[in-house]
Amino acid sequence: MVRDSLVAPQDVAEVEQQLLYEKAVAMYRQLPNVLIFTFVAASALALYFQGAASQLSLMLWWGGMQLVSVLRLASLWWWHQSVRQQRQNHEQMIRLFMVGALVSGGIWATFSVAYFYDASTAQRLVIALVMATIAAGSINVLALMPWVSRLFIAMLIGPLVILFSTTGAMDDLVVAGLGMALFIGLTGFARVSRDSSLHLFGAARDKDRTIANAASQRDELARAKDDLELRLAEQIETLQLEIALKERYAQELARVASSDALTGLLNRSSFERELRQQIEMARANSSCLGVLAIEVLRFDVIELQGAAVSEQILLVLADRLKSEMPSGSLIARWGGSEFAVTMSMQGRKWVHEAALLRGVLQQPIETGAGVMRIDVMIGISAFPGEARDAEQLLYQTSVARHSLRQQGTGGVKLFDLALDVGIQQRQRLRRSLHSALEADELSLVFQPIEPCGSSIPRKMEALLRWDEPELGAISPLLFIPVAEESGLIVPLGRWVLASACKTAVQWLGGTVVSVNVSIHQILGGDLLADVNAALAVSGLAPERLEIEITESVFSHDIDLVCSVLEQIRALGVSLAIDDFGTGYSSLAYLRRLPVNIIKIDRSFIADLDHDARKLLLAIVGMARGLGFRIVVEGVETEQQRNLLVAMGVDYLQGYLISRPIAARHVAGWLSVPNSLNV
C-alpha cells in the first residue's frame, strides 16, 4: 500500500507503458536465437525426412517456415526502429510477436500431423523430441503472455498426444501419456517464469524510484556544496592565478625543449620518451599501436631550390600531418626530411591507412619556386608484434623504410621478419666481403665465347666467384648488389680486372678476355687508370682485353660515360654492351657510345618461334648495319646454334658451347680446336 501510494494517478499510464516496453524488450531480445534455432531445426527435420515423405511437400513446409521466420525478422527490425525513434507502439509490437509465435506453432503442428502416419517409429520419436524441445524452449520467450504460451505448447504437443494415442500400441500410449505430463509441467513452468519476470520488473521499478529519490537528495547536497565552493573560490582566486602563470611558464619551457624549432612538432628525444609511454598504455589496454617513419623521396634535389623552398615544404607536410593524424597521435620531425608518427587502431589496416596518408602528403605544394609535387617513403612497424619496446619499433620502421629506399621509389612498407633477415644477411655479406678481398677468398672462372668463323679470335668471359668459409659458395646475384651498396664494387672490379688480365696473359693464340664492369666503376672510380694499371702489370696486349658494360649506363650521365669509354677504346681495348635489348638501349645511344660489340640477351633465343626469329633477325640486321660484331648468349641447343650460325652472328656463348671453366683448365680448353669451325 505504501508503495502504491507513491505512484500518482498520472503516472499509472507511464508505468503501464514501461511494463509493456519491458515485456517487448524481453521477447524481442530472444527472437534472434529463436529464429536461428527454428532454421536449424526445420532444416534438420526436412533433411531427415527426405525419402520418407514427398520432396515437394517437405520443400513447401520448409519454405513456409522460413517465410514466417523472415517476416518475424522484419518485425525485429521494425521493433528496433520503433525504439530508436521512441515510438510508443509497444502493445502493437507485442501483438505482432504473438501472431508470429502462433503461426510458427501452427506450422510446427502441421509437420506432426502431415508426416506422423508415414513415419517410422524412430522418425516419430524424432518428431516428438523436436516438438518437446521447441515447446520447452518457448517458456522463457512466451512466459509474459500466459494464454499464448499455453496455446503454443498445446499446438506442438497436443497433436502428437492425440496421434500417439490413436495407434493403439502400448509404447505409443506411454509416449502420449508422457506428452500430457509434459504439457502440464511446461504450463506450470511458464506460470512460474511469468511470475518471476513480473516480480523482477516490479523490483526494477522500485529500484528506479529509490535511485531517483537519492538523486534528488544528491542534487540538493551538490547545490549546497557549490555554494560553499564558490565562497572558497573567491578567497583563493589570486593564488590560483599565480599557480597558473607558473605552470604556463613551465609548460612553455618544456615545449621549447621538446619541440622541433622549424615545425613545432616533437623532436626526436621527446618522441622516443612519449612513445615508451604509449607502448606501456597499449600493453596495459591490449590495444594496437603503429609507428610510421616518413621520409621525403629525393629531398636533396628539392634542397637545390634553396633553404626557403625546402622549409616551406617541410612546414606544409607538418601541417598536413597535424590535420590528418587522429587525436592522441604523436607527430615528430625526426630530422632533415624525416618525420615519425604513431597511430592507434583496433584492427591492423596499417598499410591502408598509411597509403591514404601518403596520398594526402603527395598533393601539390605551393612554394616560392612554383608548384611542387613530392613523394614519400613510409615504413611501418606495429605493436604488439615482433618488437617489444620503443627501440625495436623504431628499428623496424627504419628497416621497412630502408627497403623502399633501396628500390628508389616512394611507397608504403610494413615490417616483416624477412626484411630484417635480408638486411642482416646483407650486413654479414658486407663485412665478409671486406675481408674476402684481403683473404684471397675470391676467384675467377671463365666461360668460352666461341667465334663462328676462323678469322676472329676466341674469347673467354671472366666470371667472379666467392667461396666464403662459413657460408660456402655465394652467388654473384647476392654479393654484387651488396658490393654496389657498400662502395666495394670499385675495388672489387679493380681486382677482377687485374686478375683476369694476369690469367689471360698466359693463354696462347691471342685469346681475348672479356671483363664486366659496373657503372659505379665508371662514375665513382677511375676505370681508365684501372685498365691501364691492369694492362701494365700483367703485360697483356690491349687488343686482348674486352670491357663489357650493361645497358644501365644509358640511364646515367651519358656524356661522362662516352668520354671515359672513348679514352679506353683509344688504348686499343674493345668495348661490348652486355644483355642487349633488355634495358634502356636506343639507336641514338648506340650511335654515340664507342662500342664494338653487342651481346644479345638470352631471352631473345629462349623461344625460337616464327615471331621470335623475325625479331632476332631484325636485331642482327640492325647491329650489322651499325657495324657491330654480334655475340649471342644463352645458346643451349643444336637448333639455336644452327639458326644463329645461319644468321651470320659472330660469337656464340652458352652451356652448349661450355659451362664456366676453372682458370687452370682454360689452357686445355683452348688447345682443342673450335667446334664451330670443325
Image (cartoon, rainbow, N blue to C red):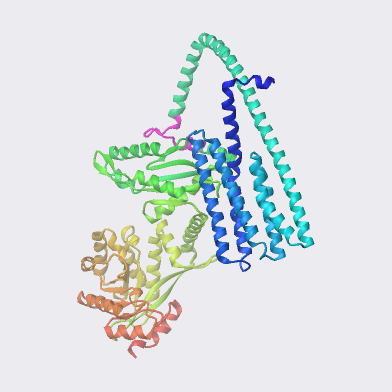
Whether residue 346 appears in this view of the structure is no
Which residues, given as a range, are shown in magenta? 257-274
Determine whether, in the image, residue 561 is placed left or right of residue 279: left
Q: Nearer the viewer, residue 434 or 646?
A: 646
70 to 544, vertically: above or below? above
Q: Nearer the viewer, residue 251 or 139?
A: 139
Residue visible at 27% across and 74% down in the picture: 597
Q: Quadrant of the C terminus?
A: bottom left
Residue visible at 24% across and 62% down in the picture: 563
Determine whether, in the image, residue 648 is placed left or right of residue 132: left
Percent x, y of residue 618: 24, 77
Q: Nearer the viewer, residue 664 or 633?
A: 633
Q: Nearer the viewer, residue 80 or 439?
A: 80
327 to 379, vertically: above or below? above
Whether the magenta-drawn stretch holds residue 480 is answered as no
> What count of labels does the image hold?
0
Residue 584, image quadrant: bottom left
Residue visible at 58% across and 14% down in the picture: 220
Percent x, y of residue 481: 41, 61
Percent x, y of residue 230: 52, 11
Whether residue 257 appears in this view of the structure is yes
Residue visible at 62% across and 19% down in the picture: 213
Whether the magenta-drawn stretch holds residue 261 is answered as yes
Percent x, y of residue 5: 65, 19
Looking at this view, name the residue that lies furthest to the bottom: 678
96 to 552, vertically: above or below? above
Q: Quadrant of the N terminus?
A: top right
